Every structure is written in C-alpha cells, then in structure tokens.
Image (spheres, rainbow, N blue to C red):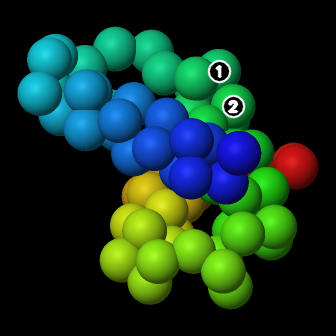
Amino acid sequence: MAISAAAAIISWRDHLEQHGGGLASNEQSFTVSTMLLGCHQWLDRHAVDAPPAQAERIAEIKRELEDWLGQRGLTYNG
C-alpha cells in the first residue's frame, strides 16, 4: 500500500506538469488539499521504510502544495 500511494501522489504531480501547466493551470484547491492529506499520511506512516528518493519526492511535493495553499491565503488543516 505504501508504494502505490506514493506512486499515485508522484504520478498526479507529474501529470499536472506534463498536461496543463502544473498547479497554476486552474482552480486546484480541493485537489491540492486531498493530495496534501495523502502526503502527510504517507510520510507519517511510510517514510522511514520507503526508498529515500521516494520519501524525498513526497516531502518535496508536500512542501510545494503547502506553499501553493499559503500563496492563496489558505491553510491545510489535516
């Protein structure tokens, strides 16, 4: 489960970049909040046992999503 959740988060983020201009492409606040929840949960549960590159990528995505929300005056309340 840990690997598939990480793969889904990374795949979603890569897909945004490849098809549609990334996070700036449209209103993403609900999707960003959901993916941020996934990042937090995955890091809490699996970061220690996961491949380091995967854990680093999820942490990077988490920071990017938190920044995205902050730039819009929104906060994550997970």
Q: Position of residue 6 (x, y in %)?
A: 53, 50
Depicted 71 relative to depicted 60: above or below: above
Q: Tell whether 18 sits left or right of 44.
A: left
Is residue 8 in view? yes
The residue that mark 2 highlights is 34
Residue 19, relative to residue 9: is it above or below?
A: above
Q: Which residue sits at x=36%, y=77%?
A: 53
Q: Which residue is mark 1?
A: 30
Q: Secondary structure at mark 1?
A: helix
- Compared across the picture, whether 9 is left or right of 38 comes to left
Relative to the observer, which residue lies in front, 12 or 50? 50
Amino acid marked by disc 2: Thr
- The image quadrant of residue 11 is top left
Please rate how many residues cluster around mark 2, counting C-alpha atoms within 10 Å: few if below 14, some from 14 to 19, many from 20: few
Pick the quarter of the image with the N terminus. top right
At x 45%, y 15%, the residue is 27
* Frontmost residue, 5 versus 40: 5
**Residue at horizontal 18 percent and vertical 33 percent from the top:** 17
Separation (CA) of disc 2 from disc 1: 6 Å
Marks 2, 1: nearer the viewer? 2
Q: Is residue 73 above or below residue 64?
A: above
Q: Secondary structure at mark 2?
A: helix
